[in-house]
Image (spheres, helix red, strand yellow):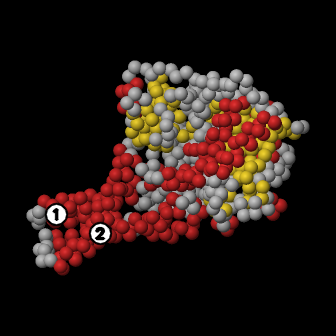
């Protein structure tokens, strides 16, 4: 299995705007997520206090002051903003820490801009609903009706706007051109969509798979049907009516706002990152202040009304906040762009968002007229921001909207046997199967373990167990999170009640991360040993009169096999040059400027193929030559290792000739 740093890079590649798994866990709220900044996991519910504190400015100020300073310091997070609204009014806003470590500039929710990642999607979906209201978009029509290029379905029916809003368009994730730090490298949304069309993994509407590409398509459709540039449309129809004067989709920032932008940090004791430019702008490019986001929350909590202005009619707003398809009982779902679920028995809608260094969450409680927005300008040490953000909302709900502790239902008969049957590796529906990025998804999967007490555990959810309380339905012990086991297309599928934008699918042996990790690891070990032994054996033969084990053609084949092993190491080293930046979440290097190196390495696929052929030839000749069993065994093991490199290169997408990854 890959390390946490590689996983963090993998999740980041899905946007940066994506609610990643951890983000989905904090919003709704996620992510993942995510997500992703990349739907947050149901918080462990606690018994309500004898007297629930009233949600007042005074109480929330004391609560917030008691949380943020220590959380930021311990997590090495430079700064944060929090804004809470209630009953159509701003209740509380405050900045903590700094917007610029070098200058010590304070975090100011009235002036300091933050990147809000995938929370930007809610502006795009609001724009879509405005055009639905105007009769210019049909949620159930083929999106090709509105495009000037074709999206070809994987199978079945066409992709619709409803599919995009529910993240069921069926698209693979993508990395290339998604993030830039040099404005000259930033593609427009239109150019990105047309030059980086994502393959479709699933039929439209069938399987949830969070997609920034899908949201970017929706933004382009807004532009085409409205006749206005997307950024200008949002400015005129949403930001201006809501008096959001310090919010923009524009990248790089306008001169009037650039000086107020917070710096972004990997962690507070490191230099600031460059300003992140998001190609899929409608999916994650907004820069905004917390105070502006208060106006956005108020408008949505009042069914589209802000003061005397409306951005949506009440019936359109109600449609937007309602699921397009009724969810399973106890499971989160997607409304028309909003994550939609229950927390502590209250309806919560919202969306989280992540770039590499900025991390945001926005949650609305429509029935209580309450909204909370929080944004951080650092990833934090060991990605601490995800836990800080998730715990913040859990604590907020448990303090002001508590619920009784849930009683654990008993396990059903046969749960232990069912747990054993579920054990294994699962891959997320939100993945890549084409291009070299697929290697990360191939090697990093979730794992279900059957426990001695008949419960199951997931590697992605630490210190939690699930007990089967009904056939195929597993509930978190001491909590409310649910897992539903289903069969989709003949493949075992697991739904997570807190994550409506992806599912876990049982990995077949060919895509099983444990199998492929062993193949990769053992093959590399054998090849390294072969190469390192080469000079050692040569020295021994010169120093001592050791007779050759084989002569003639077998000896030639043996020497060529060593050359083949060395060539494979150079081949893998070349690919490491390409994937290395990803391991450090340096995503801005993945653009057309890398095409040459990627193409060279794609063509270099001939190296492991020829190397494997040489290894097999060597094993055959050595066996026919009647060499000792030890020599024959070594030749077979080396041949298998060389074949293993071909297998990993094929399954990992190294032999894919596409430059769209």
Q: Is residue 559 visible?
A: yes
Quickly name the residue at label 1: 631
Quickly name the residue at label 2: 531
Q: Is residue 339 above or below residue 270?
A: above
Residue at position x 35%, y 44% in the image = 509
Q: Is residue 193 visible?
A: no
Circle 1 residues within 10 Å: few <14, some 14–19, many ≥20: some
- 129 or 621, nearer to the observer: 621
Q: How far is the residue under mark 2 from the one under mark 1? A: 16 Å
* Residue 33, horizontal then vertical, whole percent: 58, 43
- Left or right: 421 in relation to 264: left
* Residue 449, horizontal then vertical, whole percent: 40, 36
Please tell me whether mark 1 sits on a helix, a strand or a loop: helix
- 217 or 607, nearer to the observer: 607
Circle 2 residues within 10 Å: few <14, some 14–19, many ≥20: some
Residue at position x 26%, y 58% in the image = 640
Residue 249, quarter of the rendered image: bottom right
Please tell me whether mark 2 sits on a helix, a strand or a loop: helix
Furthest residue in direction bottom, as rendered: 542
Furthest residue in direction left, as rendered: 626
Residue at position x 73%, y 24% in the image = 51
């Amino acid at each position: 299995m890959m390390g946490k740093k590689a996983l963090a890079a993998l999740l980041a590649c899905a946007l940066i705007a994506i609610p990643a798994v951890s983000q989905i866990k904090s919003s709704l709220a996620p992510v993942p997520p995510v997500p992703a900044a990349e739907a947050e996991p149901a918080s462990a519910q606690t018994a309500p206090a004898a007297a629930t504190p009233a949600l007042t400015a005074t109480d929330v100020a004391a609560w917030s002051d008691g949380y943020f300073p220590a959380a930021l310091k311990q997590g090495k997070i430079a700064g944060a903003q929090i804004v809470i609204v209630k009953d159509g009014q701003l209740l509380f806003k405050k900045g903590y820490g700094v917007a610029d470590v070098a200058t010590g500039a304070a975090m100011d929710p009235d002036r300091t801009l933050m990147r809000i990642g995938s929370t930007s999607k809610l502006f795009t979906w609001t724009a879509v609903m405005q055009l639905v209201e105007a009769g210019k978009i049909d949620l159930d029509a083929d999106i090709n009706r509105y495009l000037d290029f074709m999206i070809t379905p994987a199978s079945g029916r066409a992709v619709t706007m409803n599919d995009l809003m529910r993240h069921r368009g069926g698209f693979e994730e993508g990395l290339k051109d998604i993030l830039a730090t040099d404005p000259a490298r930033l593609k427009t949304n239109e150019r990105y969509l047309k030059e980086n069309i994502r393959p479709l993994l699933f039929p439209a509407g069938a399987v949830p798979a969070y997609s920034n590409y899908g949201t970017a398509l929706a933004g382009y459709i807004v532009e085409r049907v409205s006749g206005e540039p997307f950024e200008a449309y949002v400015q005129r129809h949403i930001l201006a009516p809501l008096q959001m004067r310090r919010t923009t989709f524009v990248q790089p920032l306008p001169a009037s706002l650039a000086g107020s932008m917070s710096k972004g940090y990997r962690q507070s004791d490191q230099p600031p990152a460059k300003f992140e430019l998001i190609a899929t702008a409608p999916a994650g490019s907004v820069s905004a202040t917390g105070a502006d986001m208060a106006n956005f929350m108020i408008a949505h909590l009042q069914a589209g009304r802000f003061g005397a202005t409306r951005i949506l009619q009440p019936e359109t707003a109600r449609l937007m906040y309602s699921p397009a398809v009724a969810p399973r009982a106890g499971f989160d779902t997607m409304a028309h762009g909003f994550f939609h679920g229950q927390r502590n028995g209250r309806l919560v809608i919202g969306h989280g968002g992540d770039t590499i260094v900025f991390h945001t969450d926005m949650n609305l409680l429509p029935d209580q007229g309450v909204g909370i927005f929080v944004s951080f300008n650092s990833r934090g040490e060991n990605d601490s921001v995800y836990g800080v953000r998730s715990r913040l909302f859990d604590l907020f709900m448990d303090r002001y909207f508590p619920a009784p502790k849930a009683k654990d239902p008993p396990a059903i008969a046969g749960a232990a046997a069912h747990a054993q049957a579920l054990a294994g590796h699962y891959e997320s529906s939100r993945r890549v199967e084409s291009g070299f990025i697929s290697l990360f998804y191939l090697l990093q999967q979730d794992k279900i373990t059957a426990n001695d007490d008949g419960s199951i555990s997931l590697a992605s959810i630490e210190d939690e167990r699930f007990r089967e309380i009904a056939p195929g339905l597993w509930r978190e012990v001491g909590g409310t999170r649910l897992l539903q086991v289903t069969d989709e297309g003949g493949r075992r599928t697991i739904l997570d009640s807190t994550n409506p934008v992806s599912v876990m699918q049982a990995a077949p042996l060919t895509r099983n991360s444990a199998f492929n990790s062993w193949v990769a690891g053992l093959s590399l070990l054998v090849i390294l040993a072969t190469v390192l032994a080469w000079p050692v054996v040569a020295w021994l033969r010169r120093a001592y009169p050791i007779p050759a084990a084989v002569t003639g053609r077998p000896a030639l084949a043996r020497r060529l096999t060593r050359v083949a092993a060395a060539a494979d190491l150079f081949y893998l080293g070349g690919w490491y040059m390409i994937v290395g930046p990803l391991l450090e979440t340096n995503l801005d290097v993945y653009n057309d400027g890398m095409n040459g190196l990627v193409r060279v390495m794609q063509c270099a696929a001939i190296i492991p193929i020829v190397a494997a052929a040489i290894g097999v030839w060597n094993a055959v000749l050595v066996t026919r030559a009647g060499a000792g069993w030890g020599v024959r065994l070594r030749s077979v093991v080396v041949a298998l290792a060389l074949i293993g490199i071909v297998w990993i290169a094929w399954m990992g997408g190294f032999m894919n000739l596409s430059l769209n990854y």
